[in-house]
Structure formats: C-alpha cells, structure tokens
Image: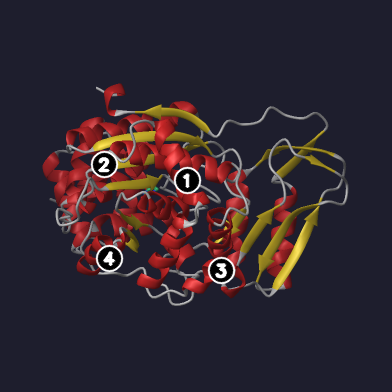
Amino acid sequence: MEMVDLIVKKRQGGTLSAEELQWFVRGVTDDSLPDYQVSAMLMAMFLQGLDESETALLTVAMADSGDRIDLTSVPGIKVDKHSTGGVADTTTLLLVPMVAACGVPVMKMSGRGLGFTGGTLDKLESIPGFRVGLTVEEAVAQCRRIGAVIMGQTGDLCPADRKLYALRDVTGTVDSIPLIAASIMSKKIAAGADAVVLDVKCGNGAFMKTLDEARRLSASMVGIGKAAGRDVAAVISSMDQPLGSHVGNALEVAEAIDVLSGRTAGDLLEVAVTLGAHMLVLARGADSIAHGRQRLMDHLRDGSALEKLRELIAAQGGDPAVCDDTSRLPTARVVRALRTARDGFIGSMDTAGIGHVFVRLGGGRLTKGQPVDPAAGLVLSGRIGDRVRAGDVLVSVHGATEEAVGQGIRALETCIRIVDEKPELPRNVLEIVMADDVS
Ligand code: URA
C-alpha cells in the first residue's frame, strides 16, 4: 500500500476500507509515515468526511494501537467523562473529586489544550510538583486507594491518537465530527471504564458551532460506545460564552478550588453537577439525576469534594496547600484591565476569539510541543446579560510582558459586545443523548 494513493482516494471522496484504515493507523503509530503525509490525510478526511463505518473502524484501530487498560481490580462500576473541548471549561477539576467523594471511582485520562481550547493536563501542571505522567500501575493503585486519578494518556494508550491529536492541533483539522468522535471514543474504549459521560460543547467557542452538529457528534460517539459495549450518555452544553470566569491554566485551577470551597458557583458548577449526576446514575451511585445532583451538592457543601481534590493533588506529587491558598499557584508578571467604554449589557461573546487570546498570551500552543505559560490568561468580570457601566473592568488580562497583555486587550475589545437591551440568557444544558436515542 502507498500512502499517497490513500490520500488521493480520500481526497477524491472515496471510502477507506478496514485494511486501509488499519494500515494508516499502524503507520502513524510506528512512525513509518512522515508527518506531512499524515497531515495531508487528516486534511483529506477533514474535507471529505468519514462515513459511520469508516469512523467506527478508525476508532477501533486507534483504540488497538496500544494497550487497553484493565480496571477490573478497581471495585464498582468505573465511570469516565470527556469534554469535546471548550473555553474556561474546568468541569473535570470539579467533577473528578465530587464524584469520587460520592464513593464512585474515577480514573480520568485527560488531554492538553487543543486549538483555542484549554487542556486539563496543562491546567494541573500549573500546580507546583503535580505529575500527570503516571504509569497504568500507579494510576490503578491510586484509584483503588483514593478513588480519583487525573492523568495523561500513557505512552501505550492510544499512541495513534496522541500523534494525530498533536498534528490536528497545528494543521487546522480539529473541528471534524468523525475525527473528534474517533479521537475521544478510542481513548475512552482503551481506558477501560464501564460507562462514559460525554460533554459535547456547542456554540461559538466549541468545535461544534450548531446544535445540529453537536447532535450528530453526540449520536456518533454514543453509537460507537454502544457498539463497544459501553454505557454512554452525551450532555450537549452551551459554549456561547466561556463556561467559567477564568480562562488560563493556573487561573482555572484557582477557579475550581474557589467553587469546591463554596466561594463561587454559577454556570460552571451547574454544568459540572449535571454531568456528575449522569456519571453517578450510570455508575449506580444515584437513583435519578435529581438524587445525583443532591449527592454531589452535599459533598461540595460538607467539604469532602475539596478534601478529595487535596488528596488527589498530594497523591500525584503536587502541593496540596494550593487548596487552602490559591496564591501558591503561578501568577503573571503583568495584569491589566480592559474597561467598558459605555453603559449597557453584555450582549454576546466571541468565545473562540477569547480562547485565541489565551493561546496568544502563551497559555496554549501555536506549534506542536510548545511549552505553555501556566500563569497566562484572563478573568472575565461578567456574563451575558450582566449590566455594565462605562469604566467598569470587563476583563483582567494576565501575561508575561506589557506587549503581550496590550495585544490581548486590543484583541478582546472586539470579543465582547455591549448592547442597549438586556439579551436573552443562553441555556447551559441544551440536550441529552442517551444510548436509547441512537440506532
Ligand atoms: N478532545 C479529544 O480528545 N479529541 C478531539 O479530537 C477533540 C477533543
């Protein structure tokens, strides 16, 4: 088989066979295919799409590109969670300790930032000493001991996805329904959980811009899960504004700690509790969504969820004292404010634009493997529908230099629109797709 022939076949809209897809994934995994040919194939797949059967075959080939994790030694139903990627989407840092505090073990493999979206691993690495690179044995032992793990993909888990993900990030091939579905579901299948809750982001700060696209991605992933014998639910949630108020690596860790400490609440907590309640129901840790919500909130209020985060940070070599004092997290040298020019209401936000500002401040990557600045980012003072007065601080921008922060402020001026009339408030959770909803 020649790679150039496969690229041309897909470029012309052909359907790749099981053998061709397996050969492609093997070549990605063992590095026999050069990045330029893999990138060209990704672009052909992005432009021509993959049908249901190609997507399922690609997913299985990627799941089989490395080890599959055996979680049978961890008691109970193991439930995993994955977000398709958003801005200020810090739900994992809330959910893992909250669900684990309810007695349901969570061994979560997370990713790095992708495109304009943040990544949980980059956020956690802003905690001094925190180690995301656990071996499977270490992770399983930690999961048995404290019921909570957040780690990077191990070298042997879905190596094909790790390579494809890094190339997609820098070749403009991220926001493709089949590529996202195969990337997420291959990792979830290989990671061994019995059940998975997917947070499918939808809106101007998500890879899926419309509800229709989000539904199609949800159905594709729930269908792949069903075929692989996993209980999967997809929650479609809005990304028409950043989910939390903090966009940044250390900044989002600080926000998660504030929420778990009960100092702040809002949309981030609301979406996390919805996802967590579905995780509890799938893991038989709650009888209904309402019961799940109540259990999660009880564990937030009694401090046990924050305590679980503290245990998780300590177990992975991080400084657990950040849970009591978030000023121990890295802070930016330069912090400047963008102020409102006139009275009105926050009418809309260009969420992807805000994510791009975060990337350009150094919080994300513009080239493969680039290091990120843990302290860079921004803090939004308001949400859509909030009243503002001329001169109010709209955003605080955190960066390493005056120049970077100045550029960030200028870029943000066009990302937040102030209007005269109070706009309709966006809903946080738009729809739920369960296994029974797909064929
Ligand atoms: N998250 C993933 O793991 N993969 C994607 O392709 C997009 C979001």
Instruction: Select label 2 or label 3 by which is in front.
Output: 3
Residue placed under numbered mark 4 in the picture: 142
Is 73 on the left or on the right of 181, as rendered? left
Residue placed under numbered mark 3 in the picture: 324
CA separation in Å, label 1 and label 4: 24 Å
Tell me which residue sits at (58%, 30%) in the image: 427
Dot 2 alpha-carbon crowd within 10 angstroms: few under 14, some 14 to 19, many 20 or more: many
Tell me which residue sits at (15%, 57%) in the image: 73
Q: Which amino acid type corresponds to the residue marked 2 in the rendered image?
A: Ala
Residue lying at the far front in this picture: please name it.
302
- Residue 139: percent from left, percent from top: 26, 65
CA separation in Å, label 2 and label 4: 20 Å
Question: Which of marks 3 and 4 precedes in the sequence?
Answer: 4
- Residue 176: percent from left, percent from top: 39, 40
Residue closest to the eye, 98 or 160: 98
Q: Which amino acid type corresponds to the residue marked 1 in the rendered image?
A: Asp
Dot 1 alpha-carbon crowd within 10 angstroms: few under 14, some 14 to 19, many 20 or more: some
Dot 3 alpha-carbon crowd within 10 angstroms: few under 14, some 14 to 19, many 20 or more: few
Instruction: Select label 1 or label 4 by which is in front.
Output: 1
Q: Note whether 420 is above or below 46 in the view shown.
A: above
Residue placed under numbered mark 1 in the picture: 298
Secondary element at tag 2 = strand
Question: Which of marks 2 and 1 precedes in the sequence?
Answer: 2
